[in-house]
Amino acid sequence: MNRSEQTRTGHGSATAGFLNTDWNPRELPAGVSTRNVVLRTQDGAATSGSLYSPGATDTVVCIMHPREFMACHYLIPDIAGAGYAAWTQAPRSVGNDMRLEHEFALYDVAAGMRFLREAGFKRIVLLGNSGGSGLYALYAQQSNLAPEKRIERTPGGRPTKLASLDMPMIDGVIFVAPHPGQGALLQGCIDPSVTDENDALSVDDALDPFAPSNGFNAPPHSSRYDAAFVARYRAAQTARVARLDAIARNLIAERLDARARVKSAGDAADSRSRRVAAHTPLMTIWRTDADPRCFDLSLDPSDRRYGSLWGADPFASNYGSVGFARCCSPEAWLSTWSGVSSNALLSKTAPAITQPSLVVEYTGDQACFPTVIANIYASLGSSAKTHRRVRGDHHGRALAEGEEAGRYVAGRIVRDWLRETFPQ
């Protein structure tokens, strides 16, 4: 592997250059060193990571998200302060899930695991926070399998070659505010009242979640959707995802058919076929922030506030330009964002996780609801698993003024679990 390294040691020095307010007000404990590395994946992509080491330890806790920069994750000081190393890794495309296919993101994870094994760590614990849960659960599942039993093709049809990927096994799993996979998350919040994928403003009034006639109330008053509406709504969400799957598969098929024609015709191929063969279309998915649980607080009740991760104004977040899966390739839609087709769903992967597992739930989470967390925990295949509930929002922030931030409580839970499960 090609690696570039930089080491800094000392209290606070390891955070230099990182612009992330989640890191403060706590710095790294004194004496923790930071080693920044660049790795080359087995399929030739570049990924990077930071290793925070408190000194002699054979156990490392890994934190990663398939599309976000996590080098300043708020749990790193707790992990290092407990005497364990922390590894944070960036995916090959930070901040861009336009072409994110989880099967190939496994190559990024595997590069990090190989580096850590070569660095001398005997025990590796994966910590999946939010969207990191789906990626790490998929890695745990696939690395637990014999190579020939791993996923052979992505949902979009591309060969994964996972059978030849070196995937070091891991020793434990921690989930903090896990959602059930990005596809399952989106299926819960996609707006099924869209009648035309080419018209972002098209609405089926009978399914409109923001119509008072269907039970909607504007903030701060909780909406009240009846059970029959919710049942129709959920079925329509699945149907919309299935329609989008069909669109994605048709786009892929058109490109592959054109490539086959060009290959067969050679120099005689027509220019239209050449253009179609070279073109990778992008899907624009509008209206993806409309989970009834965000507006009707009586549905799967918890300590959460009105609204979603994107804000308390459902019109702004659902109809605006920023949101989950807004723009992606057909392959990325099927692999990452489809609750029907994605392999990175905890309903598919969690039963294969037999390693010791910890699940930390935030009771005010606006994306990970109590029933969902309970299902994730119940589906884990481990016989040594623990579930802890902590007051806090999705990011572990305090729910009330003057209250301790949930992330600090979560940090102590993670620390105690590590010491009990992987004593030094």
Image (cartoon, rainbow, N blue to C red):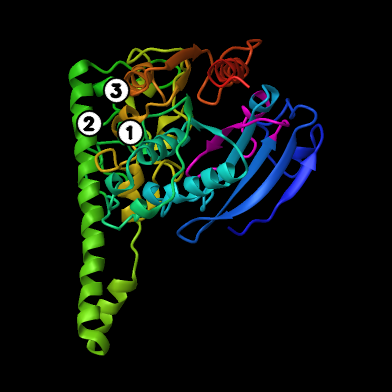
According to the picture, the residue beneath numbered tag 3 turns out to be: 212
Give the residue displayed 34% in from the left and 29% down from the top. Answer: 350
Residue 282 lies in what quarter of the image?
A: bottom left
Residue 340 lies in what quarter of the image?
A: top left
Say what amino acid the circle numbered 3 marks: Pro
Work out which residue is located at the far bottom of the displayed protein and give it.
268
- State which quarter of the image contains the C terminus: top right
Q: Secondary structure at mark 2?
A: helix
Q: Position of residue 379 (x, y in %)?
A: 31, 22
Which is more toward the observer, 78 or 223? 78
Give the residue displayed 52% in from the left and 43% down from the top. Answer: 113
Query: Above or below — where is 308 with respect to 227?
Result: below
Q: Position of residue 275 (x, y in %)?
A: 31, 76
The circle on residue 349 is 1
**Can residue 269 be seen at all in this image of the molecule?**
no
Q: Tell me which label, 1 or 2, sits earlier in the chain.
A: 2
Q: Which residues are magenta?
A: 53-78
Give the residue displayed 23% in from the left and 53% down from the top. Answer: 247
According to the picture, the residue beneath numbered tag 2 turns out to be: 207
Q: Secondary structure at mark 3?
A: helix
Q: Position of residue 173 (x, y in %)?
A: 47, 28
Q: Secondary structure at mark 1?
A: helix
Query: Above or below — where is 360 with respect to 59?
Result: above
